[in-house]
Image: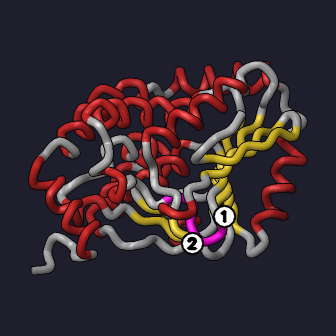
Amino acid sequence: MDYQTIQVRFEQPVCFVKLYRPQSSNTINLLMIDECLQVLALCKSTISIIVLEGLPDFFCLGADFQGMNDKTASEQEQLPEHLYDFLMQLANGAFVSIAHVRGKVNAGGVGFVAACDIVLADETAEFSLSELLFDLFPACVLPFLIRRIGFQKAHYMTLMTRPVSIQQALDWGLIDACEANSESLLRKHLLRLRYLSKAGILRYKRYMNSLDNSLTQSRPLAIAANRELFSDAENLEKISRYVQTGRFPWET
C-alpha cells in the first residue's frame, strides 16, 4: 500500500513502521495515526514484532500545530480517540512493540515511546513534554507514561517541560537500553525476540493486561480532556500565534 505519512517494510515476522513527515518534524496528524492503525490491522495474523521508528534527528515532535488551522472540526474531534486507540494497540496488541528512538521526542511522541513494550535508543535521544507552555497537558500520553515510569516522574516531567537526558531516561525506565549504534542494539533484540511465537505473546500480554487495566479505565478521561484542551479558544490562539511568529505564550 502507498502511505503518505509513514514508510513500511516487512521482514517476517517483523514489521518496521517509520514515521515519515520530514517536512513537519514527524508531527502527528489524523492521517498518520490512521495509516499506523491500518498497518497494525495488516499485522494481526502473522507479525509478532512491530518496530516503530522515526528519523535520525527526530522521532516525533508531537501535535502538528502548523496543520491545526487546516483541520476540520470532524478531524479535531476524531484525533484523540484514534490516537489513544493506536497507543492501546502498541501496549496491548498481540505482538512485541519496539520503539527505536533517535533524536528529539516531544509531547505525543513520548506517548508513542511509552506505549511500546521495549524502548531502544541511541545517545542523541532526548524526551520532553512541552504542552504546559501552551496551557495544554499531555492527556492521552500520561496514562501510558505513568504506567512506564510512575506517577511522580511523569508529573515532574510534565511540570518542568524541559528535555530529559538519555541518562535520566535510562534511570527512570523510560528507555530500556541505549547504545551509540542503536541499529546494532535493535538487531540484537530482534534476534532474540524472533524465537517468541505469536500465540505465546498473545497469551502473555493478555495476562499482563489483566493485572493492570488502568489504560482501559483512563481512555474516556484522556479523550475528554484532550478534546477540551484543543477546543479552548485561548489555547488555539496561543498555538496560532506561535505558528505564525515563533513566539511562546509568555513572550510579549
- Give x and y (percent) for residue 9: 79, 43
The quarter of the image holding the N terminus is top right
Q: Secondary structure at mark 2?
A: helix
Q: Residue at x 36, y 28 (%)?
A: 219
Q: Which residue in the protein does label 1 denote? A: 121
Which of 156 and 141 lies nearest the eye of the viewer? 141
Q: Residue at x 30, y 26 (%)?
A: 220
Q: Which residue in the protein does label 2 denote? A: 166
Q: Quadrant of residue 170?
A: bottom right
Q: Are marks 2 and 1 in contact (CB under 8 Å)?
A: yes
Residue 176 visible in rendering = no
Q: Quick check: 59 left or right of 79?
A: right
Q: Quick check: 77 left or right of 59?
A: left
Reply above or below: 210 against 15.
above
Q: Is residue 16 magenta?
A: no
- Give x and y (percent) for residue 21: 55, 56
- Give x and y (percent) for residue 107: 40, 57
Reply above or below: 45 against 111.
above
Q: Residue at x 39, y 54 (%)?
A: 64
Which of 139 and 156 lies nearest the eye of the viewer? 139
